[in-house]
Image (cartoon, grey):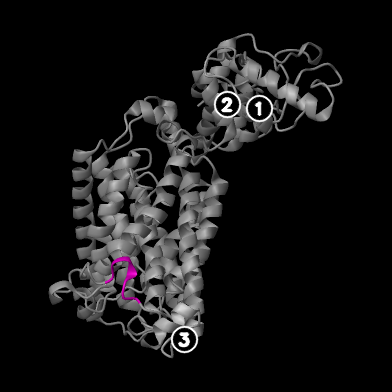
Amino acid sequence: NMMADMMTGADVQCPEVSSSDTAWMMTATGFVLFMTPGLAFFYGGLVPRKSVITIIMQCFISLAVTSVVWALVGYSLAFGSSWGGLGLIGNPSSSPLFVNLEPCRVWAGTRIPELLFACYQMMFAVIAPALITGAFADRVLFPPYLLFLCLWVILVYCPFVHWIWNPEGFLAKWGVMDFAGGIVVHISAGFAALASVFAVGPRKFLTEEDRLLAKVPHNRTLVALGTGMLWMGWFGFNGGSAVAASSRDAFALVNSTLAAAVAMVVWTALEWHHLGRPQLVGACIGAVGGLATVTPAAGFIQPWAAALIGLVTAPFCYGCVQLRGVLQWDDALDVWGVHGMGGFLGSILLGALADPVVGGVERSGMFLGKQVAASVFGVVYAFVVSYALLRVVGAVLPLVPPPEMVAEGLDVTIHGEHAYDEDHVVYAAQTRGPNFLAMAKAQAQARTVGATGSPSTSGSGTATIPSPLVVIAAVNEMPDNAEITSDLVVPVNRKNDDTDITSDMVMPVASQPSLPIPRPDSPPEQQTDSFSNDEEVKSMLLQIQLLAAKVDALIASGRASSTSVARALAGARAREPPKRGWLSSADLNRDR
């Protein structure tokens, strides 16, 4: 009768399935999926601008590759019947491609279809390996990453899930608890990230400028956007892990946001004290640390305990990040310090803070000991197996890109793309010869005239340039053997000497369709739209970016305030006005 109903399109009636639980879990599944794009934006804002596409691609490709691996064999290994009854791994023939998951078959102890449960757990599997990418940013080529991704999900992530979340797993039978992934996701990924630091090695920079750029987030707004998406997604990550629309899920949701809020406040206060100012990136990292740390305990504790976890998380993870710097471990985005150690801390605190009223588990010395033992075991397994996998993958495929590729940018050398349109103009200027941009500008101005019916000069006769999008369109149509000139790039917007130095003091490309191009060293009546040296265009935008990064580095290190940096730059202008309207590396080093 069930098959007949399915073939005729009739809705299958399943008394065991709760409509409310199913509706909530479908929503929670979408929330958890939303976290992977959020992680991509979060990481994308933290890396240098020439690595944005690379790390976003590494996160997004996990949505596809891990989903396929999970459907083929991952779900069976994780939640299938335990192979040999040992509680070590599931039978891979249990549910390949989700066979046997009929509409009315519910997951053990729940009232939702097991097929939905498999999809919900798929989203956890997707984000776990994506977390690791932040540790080896700028250091792994794409083909070996894909191979490592598949092997890691099968040999590290799926065993963790089977041991703790499958009722037949040996740690689950022993009494180890992990509500939403403190051990399964954060310890496994965080210590795999640490293993990658040692297996891949530190980043190698050809210039001091590249080293400075790697330390400064290139786009803090992307970091904030990613944090918001992650925080929202965590409502499904933790809030859905009771696998029911219940009061326990309500506790998990409230505990998650409370721990994140407290950790964000404390982390901001710590940075304010340490660096002399509150910083957006630090606040975002604090919130993510709070969310990661409360994850294993969210459905087992009272809200006061969640606030306590947030209070402890901030100084603990902040200290781990500082320790990583002292030890010179090149974990680029602090995956180990925030996710690995946060998950470790939260899994242990669960043993001391669990409340039977919330999750049916009572805190005790024995329970605490089991949590410590399971966490340490998870640390060792994740580190050793992940390190071995990377070494094996590196023996089969070239793993690390040469420094020249990194210096040019993995976005363009691996994927042939730029995250920002103006970078495409710079790349074209660097690679296509002396008259390229002049031809591009001429075409773009012709388009502007054709669109507006007016010439592309201002009323005073000063030459103008078209909008960036028009220029980019013209650049894309240029032949590869075209030549470059220097009359497209706008130099520094001049500010008063007492104005703080900010990145908006420079304009790589005009933001208005009809904007005069000033000559900073000439009176207004003598301003032209060309530079005396055609070679300047090949480095000007990069020099501007380096200047902004160096100023950020000075301020972030606590060695200077924005006001003192502004005064130093003003003094440099007074002593030796820059010929080209922007400050060189030598000027900044002299004033440092």
Q: Which residue extends farthest bottom?
A: 15
* Local crowd size for mark 2, using a 10 Å CA cut-off: few (<14), some (14–19), many (≥20): many
* Local crowd size for mark 3, using a 10 Å CA cut-off: few (<14), some (14–19), many (≥20): some
Front residue of 147 and 237: 147
Query: Mark 1 to mark 2: distance in Å?
Result: 8 Å
Amino acid under label 1? Answer: Val
| SS class, disc 3 | loop
**Which residue has dot 1 on it?**
471
* Residue 204 at x, y percent in the picture: 33, 31
Identify the residue at horizontal 44%, vertical 65% (top origin): 291
Q: Mark 3 and mark 2 in contact? Answer it, CB < 8 Å.
A: no
Examine the rendered structure and indicate whether residue 188 appears above or below residue 333. Answer: below
Query: Mark 3 to mark 1: distance in Å?
Result: 57 Å
* Residue 126 at x, y percent in the picture: 38, 59
The disc, 1 or 2, on the residue closer to the chain's N-terminal end is 2
Q: Mark 3 and mark 1 in contact? Answer it, CB < 8 Å.
A: no
Identify the residue at horizontal 53%, vertical 47% (top origin): 276
Can residue 111 be seen in the rendering of this structure? Answer: no
Amino acid under label 3? Answer: Ser
**Which residue has dot 3 on it?**
18
Q: Mark 1 and mark 2 in contact? Answer it, CB < 8 Å.
A: yes
Identify the residue at horizontal 54%, vertical 23% (top origin): 428
**Which residue has dot 2 on it?**
425
Provide the residue span drawn in magenta: 95-101
| SS class, disc 2 | helix
* Residue 9 at x, y percent in the picture: 50, 78
